[in-house]
């Protein structure tokens, strides 16, 4: 017996005749959906490229496009100051914005999936706070890891604590009976704990160190250097394919932990892998540029709205949205107030909010 | 021995032992079996342990194959558990969720390959919900999501299907329709199907092998007529019940009250 269709709908595929008209129609619609998503990813890429070019060509020094191109092509045949602006400031900043945004976007997306919580992000679960504590140890107490060169002391300390905080989250998630809710709660507890520790250090700090620290916690791309950029880019290039390879499993995980397990997904293992990837990306990003919170939280939501929850599109989508928001923030940070570079962490939230309102809060999804 | 059975199975949650060294089955292939018992008696626990989810000691056999040593991915390909909770309300289209369920364990085995979209649509059509294929899971009713969950499970073509209260959100029409589908598919594929049921009349009329659990122990096992009797129902549910023939001569369970 077949279920009479009138109760749930009308069209029907007859198994005996194979591809009926309805099946053909569904297939067509599904394929055009996939094409549209590919198109959206392409569009995001194009927007990022445009934004990077803009970011690169705008700035307080007012160099003309021809001067910029000349400096790019013949770095040794231009005035030294111009070379420094282009090669040591403009280019690394613009590219760092993209890498940081992509890292935080991907980290946030994976975190929200494996912890089954829309509020999960490197910022809300303590990674940024831990990095800030590491940085404050370096800035205020001058504490440093042995063998770390001067230029890397703050980032090094920040990185150690940031990665430590995710490993702590991972440890909690490994405990038997630790539901995702427990892990999220623990992450929030970490935020408070590290904030308290940072405040304690601020309390005993002298004025100069305090100023340095406050500036650090505002998050700024002015800390970008080529080696740091290279390291973060390499991390993205290595980690992102690993995330993409897990996309089916992560998609199934969205249908519920028990269901995913019953469909053969080794949930603890998938979760551990994801948290490891998250820890590397987010710890590197925040330890290099300071506290930049908003992107990791919001990029996944925007991507979900634009591309749905099929992680083959959602993960790269979140990465690209993060990169775009950061790049636009970087433009705003250096051009909003004439002659002043505002810390990027401040601008990110301001630039991100319109995206958030425009896409996430709109009633029906576009996809 | 044919069918799905377990030997000396023990399951603990922390220090609580829920199933203590029990042996169940065999659940016969080609027929639908029912697992009955009051709330908290260990039905879900038993099915999950049979499917290899969570920690359990003991041996689970499917025919001559020992499932115990298989990896989770391989084991769930052979023996699939459908959770009691309804599929989550995610922003995934029904068709996408079918494809994801198929791809969850990486490589799709040859017997379910071919055109995966066709296969998914066919499975949805079997349950009469092909028209929902492009709708989003977070826009479906509870019963519709339960039907999608069933289609996902059957679409994976396991050798044993363990369904935890698959009728819980369905109206009367769909309860009967799903039972018919399960009986037909089970016979056609010659697979083992075990379902947790709370409706004794469905169990007595539409299943072929029943097991009753209470507090982790087996009260009775065998053909429905032998298992569902006033005596076992009293021992299982603490109720006063009769099993009588209806006007067509089919057995019918009537509850007169609590004991
Ligand atoms: N995760 C868990 N941790 C601790 N105890 C559990 C857990 N899951 C179930 N139990 C306990 O194990 C026993 C059996 O539970 P189980 O879920 O198997 O019951 P059930 O027969 O499926 O009940 P229901 O008909 O209500 O679904 C119950 O006493 C329950 O409290
Ligand atoms: Mg149960």
Image (cartoon, coloured by chain):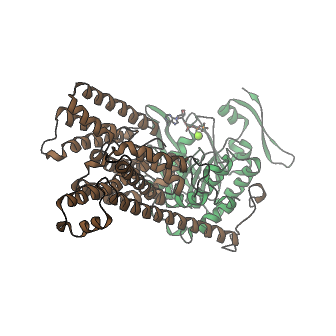
Chain colours: A brown, B green
In the displayed structure, would residue A116 be above or below residue B149?
A: above
Foreground residue, A56 or A114?
Answer: A56
Q: Position of residue A319 (x, y in %)?
A: 41, 55
Q: Residue furthest left?
A: A147
Res. A314 visible in picture: yes
Between B98 and A221, the residue placed more toward the observer is: A221
User: Which one is in front, A337 or A111?
Assistant: A337
How many numbered discs sit on the rendered protein?
Answer: 0
Percent position of residue A142, x then y: 16, 35
Depth check: A199 or B251 in front?
A199
**Residue A102: x %, y % from top left:** 38, 54
Question: Which residue occupies 26% across, 28% down?
Answer: A202
| Quadrant of ligand 1 in image | top right
Q: Is residue A88 left or right of residue A270?
A: left
Q: Quadrant of the N terminus of chain A?
A: bottom right
Location of residue A359 with respect to B230 vertically, above or below = below
Q: Assign the C terminus of chain A to one quadrant of the image.
A: bottom right
Instruction: Give the left or right position of residue B213, taking residue B76 as reference.
Output: right
Q: Is residue B194 visible?
A: no
Task: Name the image quarter holding residue A232.
Answer: bottom left
Q: Is residue A58 above or below residue B6?
A: below
Q: What residue lies at 74% left-to-right and 58% top-to-bottom?
A: A9
Q: Residue at 25% across / 48% down in the picture?
A: A223
- Estimate the x, y position of residue B15 in percent, counting from the top left: 43, 31
Residue shown at the point (64%, 62%) measured from the top left: B123
Given the current orientation, which residue lies at the most extreme right position?
B247
């Amino acid at each position: 017996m077949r279920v009479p269709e009138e109760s749930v709908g009308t069209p029907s595929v007859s198994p005996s005749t194979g591809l009926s008209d309805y099946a053909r129609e569904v297939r067509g619609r599904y394929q055009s959906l996939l094409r549209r998503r590919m198109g959206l990813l392409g569009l995001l890429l194009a927007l990022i490229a445009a934004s990077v070019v803009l970011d690169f060509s705008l700035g307080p020094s007012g160099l003309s496009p021809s001067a910029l191109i000349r400096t790019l092509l013949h770095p040794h045949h231009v005035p030294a100051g111009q070379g420094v602006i282009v090669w040591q400031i403009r280019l690394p900043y613009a590219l760092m914005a993209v890498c940081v945004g992509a890292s935080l976007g991907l980290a946030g997306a994976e975190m929200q999936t494996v912890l089954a919580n829309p509020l999960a992000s490197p910022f809300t679960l303590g990674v940024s706070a831990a990095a800030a504590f590491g940085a404050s140890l370096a800035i205020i107490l001058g504490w440093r890891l042995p063998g770390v060169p001067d230029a890397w002391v703050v980032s090094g300390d920040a990185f150690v604590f940031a990665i430590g905080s995710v490993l702590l989250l991972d440890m909690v998630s490994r405990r038997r009976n630790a539901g995702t809710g427990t892990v999220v709660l623990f992450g929030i507890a970490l935020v408070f704990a590290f904030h308290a520790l940072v405040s304690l250090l601020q309390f005993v700090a002298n004025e100069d160190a305090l100023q340095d620290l406050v500036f650090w916690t505002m998050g700024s791309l002015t800390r970008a250097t080529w080696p740091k950029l290279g390291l973060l880019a390499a991390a993205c290039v290595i980690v992102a394919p690993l995330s993409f390879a897990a996309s089916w499993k992560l998609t199934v995980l969205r249908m519920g932990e028990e269901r995913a397990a019953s469909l053969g997904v080794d949930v603890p293992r998938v979760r551990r892998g994801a948290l490891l990837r998250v820890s590397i990306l987010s710890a590197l990003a925040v330890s290099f540029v300071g506290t930049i919170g908003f992107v990791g939280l919001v990029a996944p939501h925007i991507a979900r709205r634009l591309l749905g929850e099929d992680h083959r599109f959602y993960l790269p989508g979140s990465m690209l949205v993060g990169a775009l928001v950061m790049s636009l923030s970087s433009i705003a940070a250096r051009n909003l107030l004439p002659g002043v570079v505002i810390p990027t962490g401040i601008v990110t939230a301001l630039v991100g909010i319109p995206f958030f309102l425009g896409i996430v809060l709109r009633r029906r999804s576009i996809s | 021995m044919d069918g799905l059975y377990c030997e000396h199975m023990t399951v603990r949650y922390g220090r609580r032992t829920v199933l203590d060294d029990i042996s169940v089955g065999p659940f016969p292939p080609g027929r639908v079996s029912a697992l009955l018992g009051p709330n908290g008696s260990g039905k879900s626990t038993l099915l999950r342990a049979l499917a290899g989810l969570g920690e359990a000691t003991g041996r689970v056999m499917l025919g001559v194959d020992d499932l115990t040593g298989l990896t989770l991915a391989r084991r769930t390909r052979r023996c699939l558990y459908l959770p009691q909770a309804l599929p989550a309300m995610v922003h995934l289209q029904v068709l996408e969720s079918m494809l994801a369920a198929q791809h969850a364990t990486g490589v799709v085995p040859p017997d379910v390959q071919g055109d995966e979209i066709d296969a998914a649509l066919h499975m949805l059509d079997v349950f009469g919900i092909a028209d929902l294929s492009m709708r989003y899971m977070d826009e479906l009713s509870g019963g519709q999501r339960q039907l999608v969950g069933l289609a996902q499970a059957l679409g994976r073509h396991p050798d044993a299907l363990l369904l935890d209260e698959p009728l819980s959100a369905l109206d009367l029409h769909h309860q009967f329709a799903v039972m018919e589908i399960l009986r037909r598919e089970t016979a056609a594929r010659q697979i083992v199907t075990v379902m947790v049921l709370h409706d004794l009349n469905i169990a007595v009329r539409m299943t072929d092998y029943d097991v009753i659990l209470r507090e982790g122990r087996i009260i009775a096992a065998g053909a429905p007529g032998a298992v569902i009797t006033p005596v076992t129902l009293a021992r299982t549910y603490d109720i006063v019940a009769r099993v009588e023939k209806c006007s067509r001569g089919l057995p019918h369970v009537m509850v007169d009250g609590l004991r």
